[in-house]
Amino acid sequence: MLSPRKLLALFALLSLTACGFRPLYGGAGTDGSVSGEKLTRETASIFIDEIPDRTGQVLRRTLVNRLTPRGEPVDPRYRLVVVLSDKTLSEQGVRKDNLATRYVMSYTAYYTLYSYPAGEKLLNAAATGRSSYDVQQSPYATDVAERTAQERIMRILGDDIGLRLAAFLKSFDVKK
């Protein structure tokens, strides 16, 4: 006899297959589909353009680690261009004397994937990342908290863009 917990897990697995759920990197796939190792090879063939400023460097490093973990592609098939918006700060916590005690910082990354070397635009999208930090009594501690929030946002954006690109390439009709 199956326990209620095992029965629930079996039901959850069966319901996922009924809804058309397919893991991003899993599955053997067919010759024409992009999955598993083939998807990893496709994402590793994306050349990522330089992104200006320190925050852009952190974002590009995250994208390189996520998409091309073995370094720059030798024979790129795609080119990724990312443009970062200026940061926006909004006050989240305000004291009685009207001074902010907490800020929410956000960035938007506009990215475009091109075929390489043809230059055909394949995907044009945007991703937004947000993080918050507390204002400390020490200005140095506040600066460190702000920089840490910026780096956290860049990692969030890099992971988001990497996942979206992988999902796009999985559904995209990849031509040899």
Image (cartoon, rainbow, N blue to C red):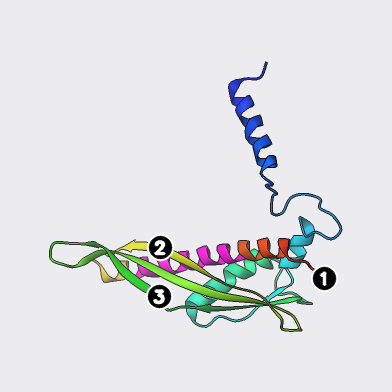
Residue stretch in magenta: 143-162
Mark 2 or mark 1, which is nearer to you?
1
The amino acid pointed to by label 3 is Lys
Q: Is residue 9 left or right of residue 174?
A: left
Q: Earlier in the sequence, mark 2 or mark 3?
A: 3
Q: Secondary structure at mark 2?
A: strand
Within 10 Å of disc 3 (Cα), the crowding (few <14, some 14-19, many 20+) is few
Pick whichever, 148 or 127, lies toward us. Answer: 127
Q: Quadrant of the N terminus?
A: top right
Within 10 Å of disc 2 (Cα), the crowding (few <14, some 14-19, many 20+) is some
The residues bearing labels 2 and 1 have C-alpha atoms spaced at a distance of 39 Å
Q: Which residue has dot 3 on it?
A: 87
Residue at point 63%, 25% (across, down): 7
Q: Which residue has dot 1 on it?
A: 175
Pick whichever, 8 or 67, lies toward us. Answer: 8
Q: Secondary structure at mark 1?
A: loop
Residue at point 41%, 69% (across, down): 106
